[in-house]
Amino acid sequence: MSDIEKKSSSPSLHENINEKRGSSVSDDVDFGGESSLPPPPTLTPEEERKLWRKIDIRLMPILSLMYLLSFLDRGNIGNARLQGLQTELDLTGNKYNIALTMYFIPYCLFECPANLVLKKFRPSKWLPGITVTWGIIMTLMGLVKNYPQLVGVRICLGVAEAGLFPGVVYYLTFWYPRHMLQLRIGLFFGAASLAGAFSGLLAFGISFMSGTQGLLGWSWIFILEGIATVAVGLLAFVIMVDFPATASFLTPEERSFVVAKKKYDNSSVGEEEKFAMKHLVSALLDWQVWIHILVYMSIIAPLYGITLFLPSIIATFGHPPAISQLLTVPPYVVATIVLYIFAIYSDRLKLRSPFIFLGLTFCLIGFVINISSAPSGVKYFGTFFVVTGSYATFPGIVAWLGNNLAGQYKRGVGMAIQIGVGNFSGAIAANIYRSIDSPRYKLGHGLELMFVGIGFVTTPIIILLYMRINKKREAEMRAIEASGETLRDRYTAQQLRDMGDRAPDFRYTL
């Protein structure tokens, strides 16, 4: 019998929380299948760390690999451009930019619907299924013969990939408490920055296949990376699990602990998980969602701008295509390291905004350097700031809103709206680096600076609003205590669940 099983007879997490808050069993609701599980055990800090490590080992490697290939497949068109794509398909004028844009439109539109069906179709089937689908589409992209075919396949790619990122973030909120979330988002999003490094290395190696079977190097980039995606998707069908309550790699006591930990993570009386239209309406009407979209856009526009055009920007420094591909690797390596540093300390300090400010500052420095007339070596140094600032900050922006929305469906819808609407700035970024603006790309860098400026304005506004609301709620709680009452004397458990993140005892993460 394991240590966790031995401790299951000790006072449970559920009982401790209910005793502390004065709740009754009759007020409680079944959450995540907890009624089929034993009482949650009491774990020592070391036992709890081992449990989370066990979950990390099962979930994070496959999620990271899937997202690495997702980002690789959407961004490798920038590398393919240097390997003959533009010449062979006659991508004159703004045709290349339009092809990029047509990916983002369906990608943004389908993100929210994809999150709504995630639980119904089960994560272990839905996420691997869409991975296999876009892998097949990516493979077929290597066989296109003209510009309309390229645009059509990019649209299909956007539809297929739309469900992965918001789906994975939403999926992680089923498993991890809110102040453990950024590190886990960082772990799998770090795969995106690694994808930037791998993309350059793979493109360099695959370029030597140019001419094989009558296909140029750009075709082989799409074909080989698409086949790899299909293989990973098939592997994910075997590895992925659905929800904590049904995870076969955990003991019943471990499952019970994770479910109870999540249930009371955001609410003193637990969350509900049954879908109702009120959750959708609540997310649509929440001021947080819409102002967080602006912060999201302030980072995602620089992120996509640098991802899609870094090879082209570096090519203006006077290097041949092969060397330009290799020079894209170091900025992404640095960005990955800083991303993990940001994630670790952000979760440890339970703060998001300071790291967002730091990332925005990095982007500001990088774009100012690149819009100037500085030597190419200095501009290359500036690309390190842009890549690092955008990639290292992104997990914190997503985690920040996820931390401050209570209720599984409201959180899922709110985060999907944030990501879906915010990603339209990626469509903008796909059109602002025009060939006619080479080599300084004043328009592109200038508009990216505008997005960064939006972040510098909206982030302090959010902080001030959160601080003001938290202060009011603390005053309300003190008034309740001073009157000799408890929170449960004023409100029923159902009322507190309905209020969610607007309940008096909910505190917004700064």
Image: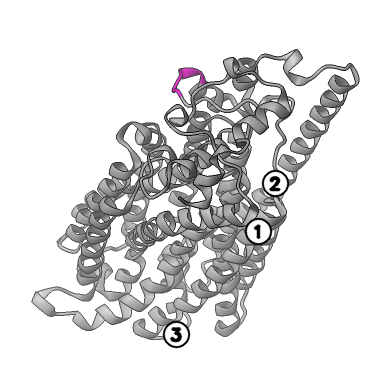
Q: Is residue 509 left or right of residue 102?
A: right
Return the x and y of residue 476 as percentages of the image width and height. 83, 23
Question: Which quarter shows the C terminus?
Answer: top right
Return the x and y of residue 70 as percentages of the image width and height. 35, 57
Q: Residues within 10 Å of mark 3 (few under 14, many from 20)?
A: few
The circle on residue 318 is 3
Q: What residue occupies the far right of the structure in this picture?
A: 482
Q: Is residue 359 left or right of residue 52?
A: right
Q: Which three-letter amino acid code belongs to the residue tagged 1?
A: Leu
Is label 2 in contact with label 3 (beta carbons under 8 Å)? no
Q: Which three-letter amino acid code belongs to the residue tagged 3?
A: Gly
Q: Nearer the viewer, residue 164 or 310?
A: 164
Which residue matches tag 2? 459
* 298 vs 465: above or below: below
Q: Residue at x 45, y 50 (%)?
A: 1
Which residue matches tag 1? 360
Please tell me whether mark 1 or mark 3 is closer to you in this view.
1
Magenta stretch, main secondary structure, is loop
Q: Earlier in the sequence, mark 2 or mark 3?
A: 3
Q: Earlier in the sequence, mark 1 or mark 2?
A: 1
Is label 1 in contact with label 3 (beta carbons under 8 Å)? no
Q: Secondary structure at mark 3?
A: loop
The circle on residue 155 is none
Q: Nearer the viewer, residue 272 or 377?
A: 272
Is label 1 in contact with label 2 (beta carbons under 8 Å)? yes
The CA span between labels 2 and 3 is 38 Å
Q: Which three-letter amino acid code belongs to the residue tagged 2?
A: Thr
Q: What span is in magenta?
A: 274-278
Return the x and y of residue 224 as percentages of the image width and height. 22, 68
